[in-house]
Image (cartoon, rainbow, N blue to C red):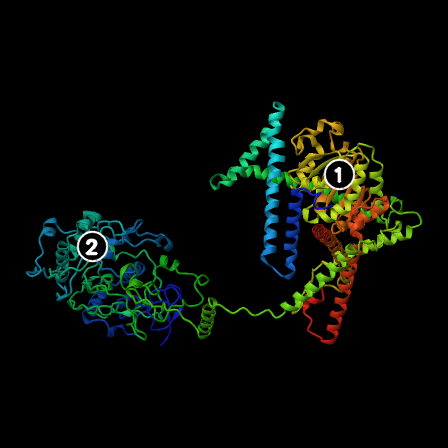
């Protein structure tokens, strides 16, 4: 790729990207106006693009264009949500904001019901079934010649889950003239759970660092390629 | 002194007590000493041992004459008098001698003439009726009484001389206060009665004049004229020389009068007494009223009336002679406390009649212990409770007014409070003062360290790029996990031209990783001719999808990738649910406002399960969970696989969905390592291969830095021990 093969928009885009990337990297020396400028530009562009996307892709495509292009039955399907959307706009005015409360309540209720139903049927029940099948050799998950490893893996998962939950058990017995203290067996098992928690945090940190490192690699490569583009 | 026994309850009381401690009955009745005692007859209980000393001479003479004239009627007369005295005691007032004569005619009263043989208990509420004094002629009643002129009274043989103050007053009680019925007219005196003595006539005349002076119309209305006339007639028979009348007292006042001693006793008085008055024990002291002297009462301050009575009152019946003289009218004073240690005069004990004796309280119901009266209990001397002790004072408490206490309204502040107040004031005073900001001494070292670490990382990343070499090998088959294999299998087995739904749900900031991870997969899809259907639950997702497709086309050298970008799905989880139910309704048009559902491979797609593959690209575990919870159940209808392409940071939270049984995610590729593995597995080097060396170098540099920092920290901790806080033991 050479400068001559790039179009003007692409060139401007590359230059802006290079500059903004340098601005963001300037945070290494501390907070400075260049970094703030880059952050503000990013936030503004994201908000603007989101507004444009909502207007074109939601309001126009899914509401107005639908009515214009397919009148009749589509109109009656679109009319209730259209009116509800107009009523929600009333909440901008304090004097009549209460009239938008029923629509808001419907939205909140529908969202909560969807989330609760999905969590129950999509996460809780399947995960409970998956946990119970950790020691089931007939579940099909155990590979050939790895039954012991399968059981050990299941045991480790079980011990890790129980000890991790016990670590967060902070109930103590009230003692006169003494500070509350957890029972000894909970203390010991909680210490084991603390190890599992530490391992989990380590894995999460590794994943975050891996993702951030990959993003850094991509940016550094962009800067490197841009410099090469301008140098060569 | 010996104790006194109460005539009512029989309890013993101190000798000086005037009222019983138990039943509050009067212990010293106001009676005149019985002259029969001197005659040798049975003395009246409670009578004084030597009554002669206290009896005036004229009275003594009267008694002697009366005894000589009427030897047979003394007992009844005494009993009658005792009865009368008992009645007066019950009523609480010692009325005039003629008041009780008029007012004792209660319902059911039995006249002495009737010779009633009824038992004593029937006379509980009865008072022996005594005939009214025959009324005087009307002309004589209407005559104005001139006290100054005086009226010469007919002298009666044996009538006592008129004394200055001695007078016979007929006080008729007010009509509303009269508890008794009118007294029946007294019978006419017997024809064979002896002529009245002069003194008696004088007495009667005086009484008549008194009656005339007392102008009480209500009394006349209350008391029929006939009974008054009857009384006047009776009195007329006993009339003596009229005497000058002193000013009449109040009707309620006790007007002491002197009882003349009638020379003859009327027949009705001479009859046997229907009452049996038991003798009062001699222990009970009885006040003996000497002749000519007024009895001692609760009003000792009242002036005593002269008790001069003519000595020749020989015809006065015994019962009349025993009547106590009227007390002088005196204003009712306020309650006074009886002086402690006062010794009232002895009074002859009263002889209780039978009916009164039956009222005597039984021992069992009488209080065993004396009534605890306050040593300084007040004896009321006014109002209807006059004579009673231990009552509430007539004076209201308000009369004993005193100034209310004045409480200080000043705030009481202790020294400790003042000290705290000063401290608070100092704190508030310094609150507005600008304090210098302390310099940060650790800033240079931290900045250098930060820059150093950044330089190392940049060098580690830049070096492979600079040298443009592949130093690190791609992941081998031993490191290929099942999730990547499954994803590769699913993509590799897609039919040509199959519609594939790809959701670009990641932020532009993490686009480098996601694009590096998913580039090989999307390129493979594009190579297999799959129709890419781009959707997103974030506003910037469609743009990222567009960018990805352009990159693919740029690599391919031609715009051969078929796709439809339907844009943004509003509503979050609710929008995904609606999309899963009816994608055509949720996304009717693409970003170019074209109906892409009715062209190409999407014409056969009516539900989400009609897609050959659903791939979700996201860096957030929540977004992945929403797709799995809302959309995956609808994909099970046709067993449409769901493949996740996630960031390395979201893999731990999303992996359980892949490893569950049954699996909710068919395949998963996470992070640059997963992408590189996929590229290695499929033999399609892509962006991940480009980043792999730098990625390795960066990981190595990070590991070295972490190790070096840990060793340095431990060394410092060993060399310079420092305090451990409570939070250092925990993670």
Quarter of the image where the N terminus of chain B is located: bottom left
Residue at the outermost left position = B149
* Mark 1 or 2, nearer chain start: 2
Q: Secondary structure at mark 2?
A: loop
Q: Chain of mark 2?
A: B
**Quadrant of the rendered structure where residue A31 is?**
bottom right
How many C-alpha atoms fall within 10 Å of the one at disc 2: few (<14), some, or many (≥20)? Answer: many
To which quarter of the image does residue B472 belong?
bottom right
Q: Residue furthest right?
A: A145
Quarter of the image with the C terminus of chain B is bottom right
Label 1 element class: helix
Between B42 and B79, the residue placed more toward the observer is: B79
Give the camera-side residue of B91 and B677.
B677
Q: Which residue is mark 2?
A: B172
Q: Quarter of the image holding residue B76?
A: bottom left
Q: Residue at x 71, y 63 (%)?
A: B453
Q: Confirm whether circles 1 and 2 share one chain.
A: yes
**Separation of marks 1 and 2 at Cα, in angstroms:** 143 Å
Q: How many marks?
A: 2
| Image x and y of residue B507, in percent | 68, 46
Q: Nearer the viewer, residue A221 or A217?
A: A221
Q: Which mark is residue A64?
A: none
Q: Is residue B581 left or right of residue B201?
A: right
Label 1 Cα neighbours within 10 Å, binned few <14 / some 14-19 / many ≥20: some
Front tag of 1 and 2: 1
- Residue receiving disc 1: B553
């Amino acid at each position: 790729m050479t400068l001559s093969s790039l179009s003007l928009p692409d060139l401007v885009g590359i230059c802006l990207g290079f500059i903004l990337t340098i601005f963001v990297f300037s945070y290494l020396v501390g907070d400075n106006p260049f970094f703030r400028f880059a952050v503000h530009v990013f936030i503004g562009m994201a908000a603007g693009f989101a507004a444009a996307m909502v207007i074109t892709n939601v309001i126009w495509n899914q509401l107005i264009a639908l009515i214009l292009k397919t009148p009749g039955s589509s109109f009656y399907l679109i009319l209730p949500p259209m009116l509800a959307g107009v009523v929600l706009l009333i909440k901008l005015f304090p004097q009549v904001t209460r009239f938008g409360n029923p629509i808001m309540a419907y939205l909140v209720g529908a969202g909560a019901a969807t989330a609760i139903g999905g969590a129950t049927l999509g996460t809780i029940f399947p995960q409970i079934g998956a946990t119970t099948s950790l020691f089931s050799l007939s579940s099909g998950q155990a590979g050939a010649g790895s039954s012991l490893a399968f059981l050990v893996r299941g045991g480790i998962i079980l011990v890790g889950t129980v000890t991790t939950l016990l670590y967060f058990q902070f109930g103590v017995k009230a003692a006169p003239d003494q500070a509350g203290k957890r029972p000894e067996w909970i203390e010991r098992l909680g210490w084991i759970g603390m190890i599992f928690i530490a391992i989990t945090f380590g894995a999460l940190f590794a994943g975050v660092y891996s993702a951030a490192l990959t993003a850094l690699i991509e940016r550094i490569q962009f800067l490197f390629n841009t410099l090469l583009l301008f140098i060569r | 002194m010996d104790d006194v026994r109460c005539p009512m309850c029989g309890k013993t009381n101190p000798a000086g007590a005037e009222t019983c401690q138990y039943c509050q009955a009067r212990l010293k009745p106001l009676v005149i000493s019985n002259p029969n005692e001197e005659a040798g007859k049975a003395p009246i209980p409670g009578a004084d041992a030597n009554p002669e000393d206290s009896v005036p001479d004229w009275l003594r003479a009267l008694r002697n004459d009366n005894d000589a004239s009427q030897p047979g009627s003394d007992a009844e007369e005494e009993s009658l008098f005792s009865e009368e005295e008992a009645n007066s005691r019950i009523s609480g007032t010692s009325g005039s001698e003629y008041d009780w004569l008029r007012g004792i005619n209660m319902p059911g009263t039995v006249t002495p003439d009737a010779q009633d043989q009824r038992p004593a208990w029937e006379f509980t509420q009865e008072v022996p009726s005594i005939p009214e004094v025959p009324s005087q002629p009307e002309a004589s009643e209407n005559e104005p009484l001139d006290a100054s002129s005086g009226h010469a009274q007919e002298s009666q043989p044996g009538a006592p001389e008129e004394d200055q103050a001695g007078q016979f007053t007929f006080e008729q009680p007010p009509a509303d206060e009269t508890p008794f019925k009118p007294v029946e007219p007294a019978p006419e005196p017997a024809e064979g009665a002896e002529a009245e003595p002069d003194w008696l006539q004088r007495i009667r005349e005086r009484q008549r004049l008194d009656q005339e002076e007392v102008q009480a119309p209500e009394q006349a209305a209350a008391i029929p004229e006939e009974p008054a006339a009857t009384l006047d007639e009776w009195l007329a028979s006993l009339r003596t020389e009229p005497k000058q009348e002193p000013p009449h007292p109040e009707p309620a006042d006790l007007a002491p009068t002197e009882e003349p001693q009638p020379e003859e006793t009327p027949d009705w008085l001479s009859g046997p007494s229907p009452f049996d008055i038991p003798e009062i024990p001699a222990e009970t002291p009885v006040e003996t009223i000497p002749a000519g002297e007024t009895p001692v009462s609760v009003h000792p301050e009242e002036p005593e009336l002269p008790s001069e009575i003519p000595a020749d009152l020989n015809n006065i019946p015994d019962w009349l002679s025993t009547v106590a003289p009227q007390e002088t009218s005196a204003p009712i004073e306020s309650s006074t406390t009886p002086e402690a240690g006062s010794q009232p005069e002895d009074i002859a004990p009263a002889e209780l009649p039978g009916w009164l004796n039956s009222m005597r309280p039984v021992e069992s119901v009488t209080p065993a212990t004396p009534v605890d009266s306050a040593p300084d209990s007040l004896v009321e001397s006014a109002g209807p409770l006059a004579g009673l002790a231990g009552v509430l004072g007539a004076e209201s408490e308000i009369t004993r007014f005193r100034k209310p206490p004045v409480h200080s309204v000043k705030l009481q502040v202790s020294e400790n409070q003042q000290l705290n107040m000063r401290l608070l004031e100092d704190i508030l005073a310094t609150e507005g003062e600008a304090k210098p900001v302390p310099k940060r001494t650790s800033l240079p070292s931290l900045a250098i360290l930060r820059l150093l670490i950044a330089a190392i990382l940049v060098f580690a990343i830049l070096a492979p790029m600079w040298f443009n070499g592949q130093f690190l090998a791609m992941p081998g088959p031993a490191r290929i996990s099942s999730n990547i294999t499954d994803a590769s299998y699913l993509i590799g087995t897609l039919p040509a031209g199959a519609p594939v739904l790809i959701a670009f749900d990641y932020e532009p900031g993490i686009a480098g990783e996601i694009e590096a991870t998913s580039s090989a997969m999307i390129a493979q899809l594009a190579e297999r001719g799959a129709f890419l259907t781009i959707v997103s639950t974030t506003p910037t997702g469609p743009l990222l999808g567009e960018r990805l497709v352009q990159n693919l086309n740029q690599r391919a050298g031609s715009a051969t990738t078929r796709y439809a970008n339907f844009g943004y799905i509003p509503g979050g989880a609710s929008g995904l649910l609606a999309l899963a139910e009816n994608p055509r309704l949720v996304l009717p048009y693409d970003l170019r406002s074209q109906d892409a559902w009715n062209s190409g491979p999407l014409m056969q797609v009516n539900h989400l399960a009609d897609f050959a593959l659903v791939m979700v690209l996201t860096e957030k575990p929540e977004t992945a969970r929403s797709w799995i919870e809302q959309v995956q159940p609808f994909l099970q209808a046709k067993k449409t696989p769901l493949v996740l392409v996630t960031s390395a940071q979201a893999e731990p939270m999303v992996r359980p969905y892949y490893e569950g049984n049954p699996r909710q995610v068919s395949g998963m590729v996470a992070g640059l390592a997963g992408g590189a593995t996929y590229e290695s597995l499929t033999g399609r080097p892509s962006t991940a291969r480009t980043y792999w060396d730098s990625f390795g170098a960066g990981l190595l540099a990070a590991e070295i830095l972490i190790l070096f920092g840990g060793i340095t920290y431990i060394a410092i901790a060993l060399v310079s021990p420092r305090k451990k806080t409570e939070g250092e033991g925990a993670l």
